Amino acid sequence: MPQLGESIAEATVVHCHVKIGELVAEDQEVMTVETNKATLGVVSPCRGKMERLLAELNQSYAVGSVLAYLETSEEEARRRALQGSVPPRAAEPSPESHPSQAAASSNVEPRVRGLPVPANAAGAGFMSPRMKARMHELGLHAADMAGIPGSGAGSRVTIDDLEKFLASLERNKTSPASSMRVAVADAMRRSWTRPLATVGLRVCLDPILAHRKSCQAKPGPTCYALRALALALAENSAPAGRLVGTRIVHPPAIDIGFAVEADDGVLVPVLRRADSGTFKELTARYNELVETARQRKLPAGATGGSIATVTNFGSFGLDWATPIPLPEQTLVLGLGAGHQAPWWDAAQRAFVPITEANLTLSFDHRVLDGGAAGRLLTRITSLLNQPESL
């Protein structure tokens, strides 16, 4: 098995183009193999006759494994410097009785745990069809394999590794994952298939803290951030668009979700058309949804279909975080904990204390670049500095 890429440690044989006894030319494709990235051909290293086929269809072989033997002339073997090719494994027929045989493989060094692998391969994401079938049977995903030490090529997790891991779980204390935890895990797994990035700005909270004192319902920082995001997206909804194929689908309405911590998970109620109505009305709807979410009594229409989410990770004492957008969303706005900090007042020519927090925007980098994300975040910050306009 030749080296098919820097991170490829093995491949599966899916087709053999020649039969035993057939003549092959130099660089003739003799097999088709499949990796996790592409379907590629294995070519003959020299002219000769196909003497033995060791590879079996739909089986995976590590880089450097002997797939077949060609019978060729001594001159041809010397010309191609094929003597001393990778020796067969103990289970393979020995080529000693055929001194002019050439293995259809390259000598790959170094060897790791007895298997030849590329020198710079720290691991391989490839999974054999048998492995995929077993995982499907168990309801497992590739992410579930992350904590299993692999004994295969490039630390690949083999079927034996998986079975040993499952057996070891029986000796440990386990508890069933709630349906909410399983749903959150699945959503985050699907979200992580996209290229995500995060930008951040510091925002002064003093204006919204002062405005809050004049409000009867006492809206929290999350409510202010949600309204500011809604108004900014109402001005330009393109940053909240979703990339589907070769088109960016713009949102039909400014429906914003917000994270509410619940037992063993997070619920995301949605404020429909968060850019419309008064801020007082939005605050009342927000408080009502928070209460019903904590009671796990959200109505069906109060979840799903949002274009972005706001999360206040500052309520846990965190200054900075990189939250992940939901699979159907492009954006998530995060608000950190508020802290006293010195700020230079040019008019007074002195430092004055202010309350500030980090504001982050995590986004799908396929839809937004840093500049567009930065402009959106700057606009949100500007709106938060003028809470009366919300």
Image (tube, rainbow, N blue to C red):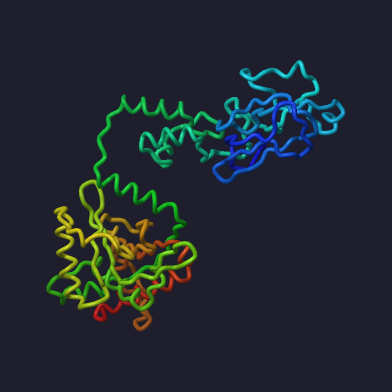
Does 297 sit left or right of 203 as displayed? Answer: left
Q: Position of residue 118 (x, y in %)?
A: 63, 37
Image quarter hosting the N terminus: top right
Residue 14 visible in this rendered orientation of the protein: yes
Q: Nearer the viewer, residue 342 or 29?
A: 29
Does 280 sit left or right of 265 as displayed? Answer: left
Does 276 sit left or right of 1 as displayed? Answer: left
Answer above or below: position of 217 versus 136. below
Q: Nearer the viewer, residue 386 or 196?
A: 196
Image quarter hosting the C terminus: bottom left
Q: Position of residue 212 (x, y in %)?
A: 19, 73
**Which residue sits at x=74%, y=39%?**
28
Q: Position of residue 382 (x, y in %)?
A: 34, 77
- The single residue placed furthest to the top in the displayed view is 97
Q: Nearer the viewer, residue 126 or 40?
A: 40
**Which residue sits at x=36%, y=34%?**
138
